[in-house]
Image (tube, rainbow, N blue to C red):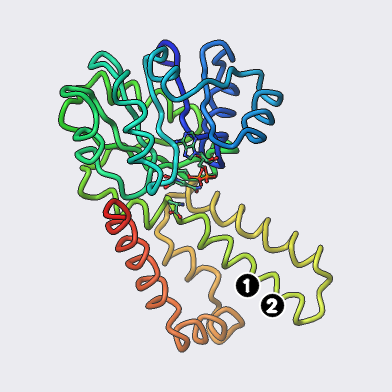
Amino acid sequence: MTGTGQVAILGAGVMGETLLSGLLRAGRRPEELLITERREERADELRERYGVDVVTNSEAAAKAETLLLVVKPQDMPELLAEIAPMVRPEQTVVSLAAGITTGFIESRLPEGVAVVRVMPNTPALVDEGMAAISRGAHCDESHLVLAEGLLAATGKVVRVPEKQQDAVTAVSGSGPAYIFFVVEAMIEAGVHMGLPRSTATELVVQTVVGSAKLLRETGEHPTVLRERVTSPGGTTAAAVRELEDHKVRAAFLSAIEAARNRSRALAAE
Ligand SMILES: NC(=O)C1=CN([C@@H]2O[C@H](COP(=O)(O)OP(=O)(O)OC[C@H]3O[C@@H](n4cnc5c(N)ncnc54)[C@H](O)[C@@H]3O)[C@@H](O)[C@H]2O)C=CC1
Ligand SMILES: O=C(O)[C@@H]1CCC=N1
């Protein structure tokens, strides 16, 4: 992994812990990491579980070379106000918050600080994350390589222009939730038809894992893979017709557009 000096994770909730555990699995030593966390009991829990130091936001900003900002978008102005007096241009700031632009962060930090915007997702917890990164105004190649090194610890990383980040947030940032929603619905259908819940769950989870592997390993278009399952006049054709009648495809389009619009609105709150 690219050497990045000490890395501080500011805000250790779901995504902060996901990053923390991923960096440790990838071989970082706990001494190379710092976390900050507003909720005391959460800080204690993580200190105990991972053996990392918990510090204040100002201490983290003073000590670490790389600052990962992982608080909710609504908490970002307060966090930036707290760290701004300590942040220096030789540091790299990496934000994982939905909707918050690099310009928003740059305008609240000293002139010249490199800011990288990242949209990760929770499968990073099992090293199957998908992260997209974008450069801010003061980034050069080295800052992007540094961010890629951190995110590659827990999955795939792609570079996108920042104007695409709201769409990325809607597709892959929130994406796992749509898949879990489909999984819930399929399990409920199995239970409705009399399958034991444990059997229905095992059938659906393995079907999702297998289908995802088939997509990735064959590189085939999803339409081709779906057609292979769909025997003429058979069961799948009957099911897909219902999905089309219920406008499930259109519902996904509207849902993902709503997420994109929500991401755009978050910075203004
Ligand atoms: N959960 C997810 O799937 C994803 C989350 N994100 C982004 O990650 C960020 C965090 O999201 P989650 O981890 O889900 O939220 P969360 O609520 O689980 O974690 C945020 C943590 O930050 C702490 N915090 C808030 N203000 C603080 C401050 N000033 N100093 C120190 N700690 C502070 C909170 O106590 C909390 O533990 C958000 O901006 C979100 O948009 C991005 C992609 C996916
Ligand atoms: O729901 C959210 O706002 C965050 C960003 C992407 C996934 N979770």
User: With respect to residue 175, does 162 lie above or below?
Assistant: above
Q: Nearer the viewer, residue 62 or 180?
A: 62
Dot 2: within a 10 Å radius of its alpha carbon, few (fewer than 14), some, or many (20 or more) residues?
A: few
- In terms of secondary structure, where does tag 1 sit? helix
| Quadrant placement of the C terminus | bottom left
Residue name at image x 26 percent, y 13 percent: 90
| Quadrant placement of the N terminus | top left
Dot 1: within a 10 Å radius of its alpha carbon, few (fewer than 14), some, or many (20 or more) residues?
A: few
Q: Amino acid at mark 2?
A: Ala
Residue name at image x 23 percent, y 17 percent: 89
Please, which residue is most extreme toward the right here?
Answer: 196
Residue name at image x 58 percent, y 21 percent: 24
Residue under pointer 1: 185
- In terms of secondary structure, where does tag 2 sit? helix
Q: Is mark 1 within 8 Å of ligand 2?
A: no
Task: Please tell me the numbered disc located at residue 189.
Answer: 2
User: With respect to residue 262, does 92 lie above or below?
Assistant: above
Q: Please tell me in which quadrant of the rendered image residue 130 appears.
A: top left
Give the mark count.
2
Q: Nearer the viewer, residue 148 or 162?
A: 162
- Distance from label 1 to label 2 (Cα)? 6 Å
User: With respect to residue 109, does 176 lie above or below?
Assistant: below
Left or right, residue 196 beside residue 177: right
Residue name at image x 35 percent, y 35 percent: 95
Left or right, residue 239 beside residue 263: right
| Image position, residue 19 (x, y; %) | 52, 32
Q: Amino acid at mark 1?
A: Ala
| Image position, residue 117 (x, y; %) | 30, 37
Q: Nearer the viewer, residue 171 or 234?
A: 171
Q: Are marks 1 and 2 in contact (CB under 8 Å)?
A: yes
| Image position, residue 82 (x, y; %) | 36, 29
